[in-house]
C-alpha cells in the first residue's frame, strides 16, 4: 500500500507491542520504520498484537487505520492529517451493535475491511485465535458504518471456515475473475486461499409505516427490489407474520409469490391494515421473503409499522353528593371516566382531601390507585361517609386525581358533598284571649337547637271556628320569620279583632300555621288562639196576651217569648198551658217546645181560643215555661185572657143608577153580628169623599143625612136611606160615604159604606146581575158556584144590562180554569138592552177552583168588568 | 433493524480452502502465524505475496512466477528496510 502517495508501495504492519509500524518505500528500497502516533505518542493497540488495515473509513478521501488487537477488539484511528501525510489524534473501539466489537473469545482480532455483502457498504471480516473468519455486516452507511451485533461465521464449501489457529484474513481477486477472494494465514504459517463466486443478485424488501385509521382498512405497501437485472425470471415467496400487531385484529394475513421478469427490478406487496379507535402503542408486523429463485434474499424482512392515530384518552371525575345517615356509614361512590376507549391499561392515583368535611371524622381517609382495564371506559371507588346527629352545614371534601398513565387528566378534582340530615325542630305555642279583651296575644315560635346559619319559616293565619275578617285579620300572604344564628325563639303578636258582643256563644279558635321551613323542620305546625266567650246565657220571658174570642171558629192567642240577648246557640224551652177560668171549651190546651234559632230573640207561641156568641165574662189561662236550654227563665208564666166577643155593627156599600131626573133612594143596610140582649145604638152621617171627579157632592148629588140607629134587643138589621138626585149630565160615577160611630153595647166592625151613584148619561153602563143580585165590579163581589162532585156541573146564569145611554160594546168574556162559558154575550147591547151568559163549573180534577171573570166593555168605569168566582169540585 | 439476520444466500460463496504452494511445497513460514498480503511488489504487473510471521517478525516476499489470474510461487526472500531485514516485535 502507498502510505505517502509517492507511487511506491509501503509496508504497514503491527507487532506484539501493539505499535503500528510504517516502512516507507524508496527507489533505494524500504526505509527504516516509523511508528504511527496518536497525537505525540506512539500508538499502542490496547491488547497488543496489533493487526492494521488501511482504508478510507469515513469516505473523506484520507486513508484511515483499522487495527485489531490481542484481546480481540478492533480500533479505528481516523486520519486528521492528509491522505499523503496521515496523522491521528485518537483511537476508538469499533462497535458491533451497542457493544465493542469482539472478534472471538480468544482474542487476536485480525480485521479486513471489504464490502462482502455487495450492498455498496464496507463490512468487516475479522480473524481470531480459534481460526474462524467472522463477518460483521455494516447496517449503517458506507461512510458511517454501524455493525450488526451478531457476527456471521463465513462458510467455505458449505462448512464454517477453520483456517487453523490465528486466522489472519486478507482479500484479493486471486484469480482475476472479478470476484474478491479470501486468503488467510494461520498459526502454522500456511497461506490458504478461498475462491469466491459472485452471489445471486439480492432481493430486498422495504419497510412501511401506515396510519391505522378508525374503522376501515388501509393498504400498507412494501416494495421488493432486485439489486440488478438478471437474464432469467426471478421468483420469491412472501408472507405476513405477527409482531406486536396480530393478524385478524390489526391486519389481514396474506401471502403470495412475486415474479420479476427479466429486466424488472421492483415489485410491490399490499397488505390490509385494520383500523380501530382504541388508543394504543404503535404496533408492527412483518412481511418476510423466502424461497427466491435466481436471486438471493438480501433483506427478506419488511417491517410494517401501524402508527396509532387515536388520541390519548383523558380522565374526568364527577362530583358526588350524599345525605349522611345518622348512626351509620354511607358509601359515596365516585366515578372516574375515560373520554374514549383505549387499548391500554390506564391507571391513576386518587386521594380524598379534607375540606369542611374532615378525614377521620366525617369520612374515612381514602387513597389508592385506580386501574381501568383496556377497553373499559370507567371505574368507581368509594369513600365512606360517617353519619352524625350534629346540626350542621353541608360539608365537602375534595377527591384529587394524579399521576395518570396512558391518559391525561381533563378534570382531576371532584367535590364530595355530605348533606346534613339533622335539622333543628320548630314549635309554636298556643294562646287564649277573652272576647272582650283588648290588645295582642303573644305566641312564641321556638327552635329546638341554636344553629349557626339563619333559619327561616313562614306563617299564615288559618280560620277555625273564629272567622277571618270578623274575628281576626287574616294573614294570607306568608310572613317570614328569620332566626339569626344563635337565636332560639321568635315572638309573634296577634291582635284578634275586639268583638265584645253579648251573645252567648262557644269559644272560638283560629290558628297560626307554620309553613315552608328552611334549615329546620316543623314539629308543631299550628299555634291555636282561643277567643273565650264572656257572655252569660240569655234569659227567657213570656208576655201576657188578651184576645177577643170572635163569634165562631178559633182565634190565636199569640204569646211572644223573648230572649234577653241573641245567642249563638239554639235556645229552647218547654211550655205547658194550664187552666185558670178558661178550660178546654175555651181554648186548645197544649204543651211543647219553643226553639229560638241562633241569633233570634223572639218567638211567637199561638194558643187557639174558641169563639162563640155567648155573652160571658172574660176568662184566663196560663202558659208555663220550664226546662230551658242555653238560657234561664226570667218570667215563667204568661197569662192568656180570652175576651168575650161583643156584637158588632157593619154597614154595606150600595150603588144606584142616578136616573135622568127626580130623586131615588139609596138604602144602606146596617147589620148586627148577633142578637144582643140589650138595646144597641149607633150614630151615623153621610160624608163627602175627598173632593174630585168621583166625589159626589152633598146637596146636588145626594142629600146629606145623619141620625142615630137603635136596635131593639134581638133586632139584627137597620137601614139608612139617602136620597139621590137624577140628572142628564154626562159624568163619571160619583161616590160618597155613610159612617157609623158612637155605638153602644156593640162594637163597630165596619164603619164606612160607600154609596156609588152610577152615571147613566151618554155612556154605556154595564150592570151585571145574578138573578136579582147585583154583582159589583172590581173583584169586590164573590160568586160561589158551590160544591159539586166530579163529573157534575154547577151552572150560574148572569145577566148583563146596558143601563147607559149609548150602546154597550161587549168585546170579550173570559173564564178562569175549571169554568166554561156555555153561552156567550152579544157583541153590543143597546141602551136598556140585556143579555145573559152562562158559566159552568165542571172538572174531573177535584179541587177548589177560584178565579176572576172578565167582561171587556166600553163602559168607561168598568172595563173590564170583573168579579171573583169560586167553587169546589170533590170526588 | 433489530431482528434482522444477514442471510448467507446474499454472500459470495466460498470454495473449500486451498493451501498456497511455493515451489511445489505448502508455504509454511517459520514460527507460524502467517499474515498474508498481496501487492505487485516487484512492479511486473502481477500480484505478489507478502507474508508476515511470528516471533522473528520477518516479512517474506513471494514473487509471482505465474500469471495475474493464476499466481504461482517458487522462492521467497525476507524484506529488508534501511539495510536490515525487517523484524517486528513478535510480528
Image (cartoon, rainbow, N blue to C red):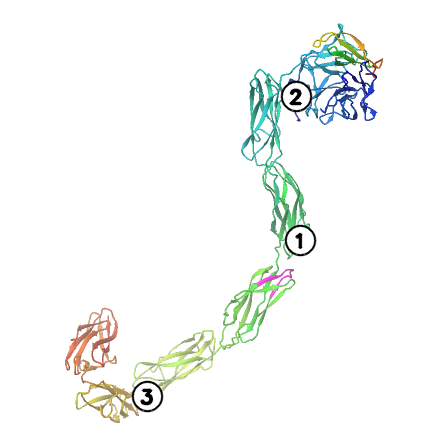
In this rendering, is residue A815 above or below A194?
below
In this rendering, which labeled residue sits more in front, label 2 or label 1? 2
Residues at marks 1 and 3 touching, judged by CB atoms closer than 8 Å = no
**Mark 3 residue crowding within 10 angstroms, few (<14) / some (14–19) / many (20+):** few
Q: Does the magenta segment cover residue A450?
A: yes
Q: Quadrant of residue A279?
A: top right
Q: Classify residue A760 as left or right of residue A632.
A: left
Q: Position of residue A535 (x, y in %)?
A: 51, 77
In the displayed structure, A41 sits above or below A458; it is: above
- Name the residue carrying label 1: A356
Q: Chain of mark 2?
A: A
Measure the alpha-carbon separation of dots 3 and 2. 171 Å
Residue A616: mark in rendering: 3
- The picture places residue A732, in percent across and down from the top left corner, at 23, 85
Look at the image and give the residue range highlighted in magenta.
A445-457
A272 and A248: which is toward the camera = A272
Q: Position of residue A518 (x, y in %)?
A: 59, 60
Under circle 1, the secondary element is loop
**Which label lies toward us, 3 or 2?**
2
Which residue is at 75% across, 5% downward? Answer: B24
Q: Is residue A147 above or below residue A184?
A: below
Q: Mark 1 falls within which chain?
A: A
Which element carries disc 2, helix, strand or loop?
A: loop
- Which one is in front, A566 or A657? A657
Q: Is residue A400 visible?
A: yes
- What mark, if any, has residue A119 been given in the picture? 2
Amino acid at each position: 500500500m502507498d502510505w505517502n502517495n509517492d507511487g511506491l508501495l509501503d509496508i504497514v504492519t503491527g507487532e506484539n507491542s501493539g505499535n503500528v509500524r510504517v516502512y516507507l518505500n524508496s527507489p533505494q528500497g524500504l526505509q527504516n520504520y516509523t511508528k504511527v502516533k496518536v497525537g505525540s505518542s506512539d500508538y499502542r493497540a490496547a491488547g497488543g498484537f496489533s493487526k492494521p488495515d488501511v482504508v478510507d473509513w469515513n469516505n473523506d478521501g484520507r486513508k484511515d487505520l483499522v487495527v485489531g488487537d490481542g484481546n480481540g477488539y478492533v480500533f479505528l484511528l481516523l486520519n486528521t492529517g492528509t491522505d499523503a501525510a496521515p496523522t491521528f489524534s485518537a483511537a476508538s473501539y469499533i462497535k458491533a451493535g451497542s457493544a465493542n466489537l469482539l472478534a472471538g473469545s480468544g482474542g487476536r482480532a485480525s480485521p479486513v475491511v471489504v464490502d462482502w455483502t455487495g450492498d455498496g457498504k464496507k463490512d468487516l471480516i475479522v480473524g481470531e485465535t480459534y481460526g474462524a473468519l467472522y463477518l460483521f455486516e455494516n447496517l449503517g452507511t458506507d461512510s458511517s458504518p454501524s455493525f450488526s451485533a451478531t457476527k456471521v461465521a463465513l462458510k467455505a464449501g458449505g462448512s464454517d471456515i477453520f483456517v487453523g489457529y490465528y486466522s489472519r484474513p486478507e482479500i484479493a481477486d486471486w484469480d482475476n475473475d472479478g470476484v474478491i477472494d479470501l486468503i488467510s494465514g494461520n498459526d502454522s504459517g500456511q497461506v490458504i486461499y478461498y475462491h469466491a463466486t459472485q452471489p445471486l443478485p439480492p432481493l430486498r424488501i422495504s419497510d412501511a409505516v401506515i396510519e391505522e385509521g378508525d374503522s376501515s382498512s388501509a393498504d400498507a405497501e412494501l416494495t421488493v427490489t432486485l439489486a440488478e437485472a438478471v437474464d432469467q425470471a426471478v421468483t420469491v415467496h412472501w408472507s405476513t407474520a405477527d409482531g406486536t400487531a396480530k393478524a385478524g385484529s390489526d391486519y389481514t394475513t396474506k401471502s403470495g409469490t412475486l415474479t420479476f421478469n427479466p429486466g424488472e427490478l421492483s415489485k410491490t406487496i399490499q397488505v390490509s391494515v385494520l383500523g380501530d379507535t382504541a388508543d394504543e402503542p404503535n404496533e408492527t408486523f412483518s412481511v418476510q421473503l423466502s424461497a427466491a429463485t435466481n436471486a438471493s434474499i438480501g433483506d427478506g424482512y419488511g417491517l410494517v409499522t401501524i402508527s396509532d392515530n387515536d388520541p390519548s384518552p383523558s380522565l374526568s371525575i364527577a362530583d358526588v353528593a350524599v345525605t349522611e345517615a345518622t348512626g351509620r356509614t354511607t358509601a359515596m361512590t365516585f366515578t372516574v371516566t375515560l373520554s374514549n376507549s383505549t387499548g391500554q391499561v390506564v391507571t391513576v392515583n386518587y386521594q380524598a382531601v379534607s375540606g369542611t368535611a374532615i378525614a377521620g371524622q366525617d369520612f374515612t381517609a381514602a387513597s389508592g390507585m385506580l386501574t381501568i382495564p383496556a377497553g373499559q371506559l370507567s371505574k368507581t371507588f368509594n369513600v365512606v361517609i360517617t353519619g352524625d346527629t350534629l346540626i350542621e352545614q353541608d360539608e365537602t371534601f375534595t377527591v384529587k386525581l394524579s399521576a395518570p398513565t396512558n391518559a391525561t387528566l381533563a378534570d382531576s378534582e371532584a367535590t364530595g358533598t355530605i348533606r346534613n340530615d339533622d335539622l333543628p325542630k320548630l314549635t309554636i305555642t298556643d294562646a287564649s284571649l277573652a272576647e272582650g279583651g283588648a290588645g295582642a296575644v303573644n305566641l312564641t315560635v321556638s327552635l329546638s337547637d341554636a344553629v349557626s346559619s339563619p333559619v327561616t319559616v313562614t306563617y299564615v293565619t288559618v280560620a277555625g271556628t273564629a272567622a277571618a275578617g270578623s274575628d281576626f285579620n287574616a294573614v294570607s300572604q306568608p310572613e317570614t320569620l328569620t332566626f339569626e344564628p344563635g337565636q332560639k325563639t321568635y315572638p309573634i303578636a296577634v291582635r284578634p279583632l275586639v268583638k265584645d258582643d253579648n251573645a252567648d256563644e262557644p269559644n272560638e279558635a283560629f290558628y297560626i300555621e307554620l309553613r315552608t321551613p328552611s334549615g329546620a323542620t316543623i314539629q308543631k305546625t299550628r299555634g291555636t288562639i282561643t277567643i273565650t266567650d264572656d257572655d252569660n246565657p240569655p234569659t227567657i220571658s213570656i208576655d201576657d196576651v188578651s184576645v177577643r174570642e170572635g163569634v165562631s171558629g178559633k182565634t190565636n192567642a199569640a204569646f211572644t217569648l223573648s230572649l234577653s240577648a241573641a245567642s249563638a246557640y239554639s235556645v229552647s224551652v218547654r211550655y205547658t198551658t194550664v187552666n185558670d177560668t178558661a178550660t178546654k171549651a175555651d181554648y186548645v190546651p197544649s204543651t211543647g217546645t219553643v226553639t229560638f234559632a241562633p241569633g233570634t230573640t223572639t218567638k211567637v207561641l199561638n194558643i187557639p181560643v174558641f169563639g162563640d156568641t155567648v155573652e160571658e165574662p172574660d176568662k184566663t189561662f196560663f202558659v208555663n215555661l220550664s226546662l230551658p236550654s242555653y238560657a234561664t227563665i226570667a218570667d215563667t208564666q204568661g197569662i192568656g185572657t180570652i175576651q168575650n166577643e161583643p156584637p158588632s155593627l157593619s154597614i154595606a156599600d150600595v150603588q144606584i143608577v142616578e136616573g135622568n131626573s127626580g130623586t131615588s133612594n139609596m138604602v144602606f143596610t146596617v147589620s148586627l153580628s148577633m142578637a144582643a140582649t140589650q138595646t144597641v145604638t149607633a150614630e151615623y152621617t153621610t160624608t163627602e169623599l175627598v173632593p174630585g171627579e168621583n166625589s159626589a157632592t152633598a146637596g146636588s148629588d145626594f142629600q146629606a143625612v145623619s141620625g142615630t140607629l137603635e136596635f131593639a134587643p134581638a133586632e139584627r138589621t137597620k137601614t139608612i136611606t139617602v136620597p139621590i138626585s137624577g140628572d142628564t149630565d154626562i159624568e163619571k160615577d160619583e161616590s160618597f160615604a155613610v159612617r157609623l160611630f158612637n155605638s153602644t153595647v156593640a162594637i163597630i166592625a165596619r164603619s164606612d159604606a160607600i154609596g156609588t151613584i152610577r152615571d147613566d148619561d151618554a155612556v154605556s153602563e154595564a150592570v151585571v146581575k145574578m138573578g136579582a143580585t147585583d154583582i159589583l165590579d172590581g173583584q169586590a163581589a164573590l160568586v160561589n158556584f158551590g160544591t159539586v162532585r166530579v163529573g157534575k156541573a154547577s151552572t150560574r146564569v148572569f145577566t148583563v144590562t146596558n143601563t147607559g145611554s149609548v150602546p154597550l160594546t161587549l168585546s170579550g168574556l173570559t173564564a178562569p180554569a175549571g169554568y166554561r162559558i156555555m153561552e156567550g154575550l152579544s157583541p153590543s147591547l143597546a141602551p136598556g138592552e140585556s143579555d145573559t151568559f152562562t158559566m159552568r163549573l165542571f172538572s174531573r180534577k177535584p179541587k177548589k177552583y177560584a178565579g176572576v171573570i172578565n167582561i171587556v166593555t166600553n163602559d168607561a168605569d168598568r172595563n173590564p168588568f170583573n168579579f171573583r168566582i169560586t167553587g169546589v169540585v170533590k170526588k | 433493524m433489530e431482528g434482522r439476520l444477514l442471510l448467507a444466500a446474499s454472500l459470495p460463496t466460498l470454495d473449500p480452502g486451498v493451501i498456497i504452494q511455493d515451489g511445489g511445497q505448502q508455504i509454511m513460514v517459520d514460527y507460524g502465524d502467517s499474515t498474508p498480503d498481496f501487492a505487485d511488489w516487484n512492479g511486473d504487473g502481477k500480484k505478489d505475496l507478502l507474508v508476515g510471521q511470528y516471533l522473528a517478525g520477518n516479512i517474506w516476499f513471494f514473487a509471482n512466477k505465474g500469471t495475474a489470474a493464476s499466481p504461482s510461487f517458487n522462492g521467497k526472500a525476507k524484506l529488508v528496510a534501511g539495510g536490515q531485514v525487517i523484524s517486528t516485535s513478535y510480528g
